[in-house]
């Protein structure tokens, strides 16, 4: 049986998680500038972040289904 740690989709998932964490840090650091954005740009930013979180969630589902990998059970 092949280890999950040698599957490219696992590395894509990990890199995606790291990039989401960096985005959250940047959002926190520049919150005062972000809160002053015009409503249209703020909506676009929120929708983009929603897409990112959704894709990361789908990646979790794929890893759990295809490789029986659930990081919460580790």
Image: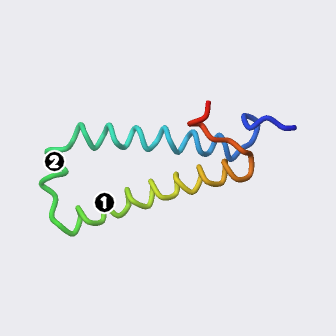
Q: Quadrant of residue 7?
A: top right
Q: Earlier in the sequence, mark 2 or mark 1?
A: 2
**Given the current orientation, which residue lies at the most extreme right position?**
1
Q: Which labelled disc corresponds to residue 46? A: 1
The 10 Å Cα crowd at callout 1, few under 14, some 14 to 19, many 20 or more, is few
Give me the C-alpha separation between circle 2 and circle 1.
Answer: 15 Å
Q: Quadrant of the C terminus?
A: top right
Please give the name of the residue rendered at 61% of the width and 34% of the height, measured from the top-left corner: 73
Q: Secondary structure at mark 1?
A: helix
Q: Number of numbered discs present?
A: 2
In the displayed structure, does residue 13 sit left or right of residue 40?
Answer: right
Q: Quadrant of residue 37?
A: bottom left
The image's mark for residue 12 is none
Q: What's the residue at 17%, 66% (across, down)?
A: 39
Where disc 2 sits, the SS reads helix
Q: Residue furthest bottom?
A: 40
Tell me whether the residue at label 2 lies in contact with that at label 1, contact meaning CB atoms closer than 8 angstroms.
no
Residue for badge 2: 33
Q: Residue 57: image x %, image y %?
A: 52, 53
Indicate whether 31 appears above or below 51: above
Question: Which is more toward the observer, 7 or 72?
Answer: 72
Picture coordinates of residue 67, whole percent (x, y): 74, 46
Q: Is residue 59 left or right of residue 69?
A: left
Q: Is residue 61 left or right of residue 20?
A: right
Q: Position of residue 30 (x, y in %)?
A: 21, 41
Q: Residue furthest top?
A: 74
Density class for disc 2 (Cα within 10 Å; few <14, some 14-19, many ≥20) is: few
Quarter that holds the N terminus? top right
Q: How is the image coloured?
A: rainbow
Residue 2: x and y in percent read 84, 38
Name the side, left or right, on which 2 lies relative to 65: right
């Amino acid at each position: 049986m092949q280890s999950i740690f040698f599957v490219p989709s696992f590395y894509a998932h990990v890199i995606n998680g790291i990039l989401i964490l960096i985005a959250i840090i940047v959002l926190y650091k520049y919150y005062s500038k972000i809160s002053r954005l015009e409503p249209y740009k703020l909506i676009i930013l929120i929708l983009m972040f929603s897409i990112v979180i959704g894709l990361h969630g789908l990646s979790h589902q794929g890893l759990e289904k295809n490789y029986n990998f659930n990081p919460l059970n580790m």
